[in-house]
Image: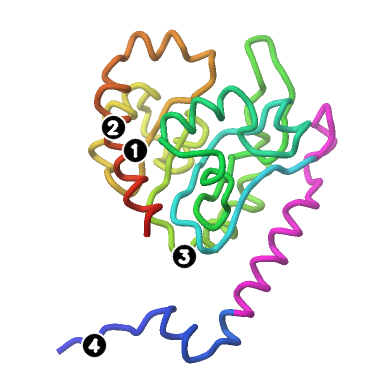
Amino acid sequence: MRLRSPGPNWIRREYPLWGWLAMTSYSTLLTEVRACKICEAYLPLGARPVLQLHPKARVLIAGQAPGKKVHDSGVPFDDASGNRLREWMGVTREVFYDPQKIAILPMGFCFPGTGKSGDLPPRPECAPAWRKQLLGELRHLEVTLVIGRYAQAYHFGETGATVTDLVKSWRSYWPQIIPLPHPSPRNNLWLRRNPWFEAELLPSLRERLSEVLAR
């Protein structure tokens, strides 16, 4: 007969110091990330990492990079894209900004600047420097929302699929990981051309998140 491992929750009950050390490690890492300046020379407004993280979070939002408004406020998704994303998820601002419920880790933590057709891509230095360590802190994660092609390339691998094709195949990854288009107003045309997204995916997404966040 195979014996099951008691798991990390048992360790925390029997050895409270272990849990304290884990939280200390997480806090130190988060402080280091928020002080990061590895790509500041390339950032038009300087470094201001914007993220939200707590080891108890059950939902992860893997986005692209903060826009200028988010850079100014220091609050993730504090813009029109965030309003739409919260509507898609069916959550209030209070729930959305509770780090013990929802973690928010974009592929780049700082505003990368603006190009000819919108914001520039996330800086390439960010994910290799921090992402694996930060994801390792999310020990209770149940659902990951992967927004936009840069985050999708990281979390799904370079499949060659377009954002539309990947989002259409959402049932293949359900219920742990869910690809989404970017909620930017720039994607209004995409939403009109793909009515199945709001009719099929979003009701299932809201139901799944309601179930997970209620625990």
Is residue 189 found left or right of 121 in the rendered image?
Answer: left
- Counting residues from the start of the chain, the first of labels 4 and 2 encountered is 4
Counting every numbered tag in the picture gives 4
Asked which colour scheme the image uses, the reply is rainbow
Is label 2 in a helix, a strand or a loop?
Answer: helix
Is label 4 in a helix, a strand or a loop?
Answer: loop
What separation in Å lies between label 1 and label 3 (alpha carbons)? 22 Å
- Dot 4 amino acid type: Leu
Magenta region, mostly helix, strand or loop? helix
Is label 1 in a helix, a strand or a loop?
Answer: helix
Which numbered marker is on residue 203? 2
Is label 3 in a helix, a strand or a loop?
Answer: loop
What is the x, y in percent for residue 130?
64, 53
What separation in Å lies between label 1 and label 2 (alpha carbons)? 5 Å
- From which residue to which does the magenta span run? 20-47
| Residue depicted at x 54% and y 50% | 103
Is residue 165 found left or right of 69 in the rendered image?
Answer: left
Which numbered marker is on residue 95? none
- Tags 1 and 2 in contact by the CB under 8 Å rule? yes
- Counting residues from the start of the chain, the first of labels 3 and 4 encountered is 4
Which numbered marker is on residue 206? 1
| Pointer 4 residue | 3
| Pointer 3 residue | 139
What separation in Å lies between label 1 and label 4 (alpha carbons)? 37 Å
Mark nearer the viewer, 1 or 3: 1
What is the x, y in percent for residue 29?
69, 62
| Residue depicted at x 47% and y 33% | 147
- Dot 1 amino acid type: Arg
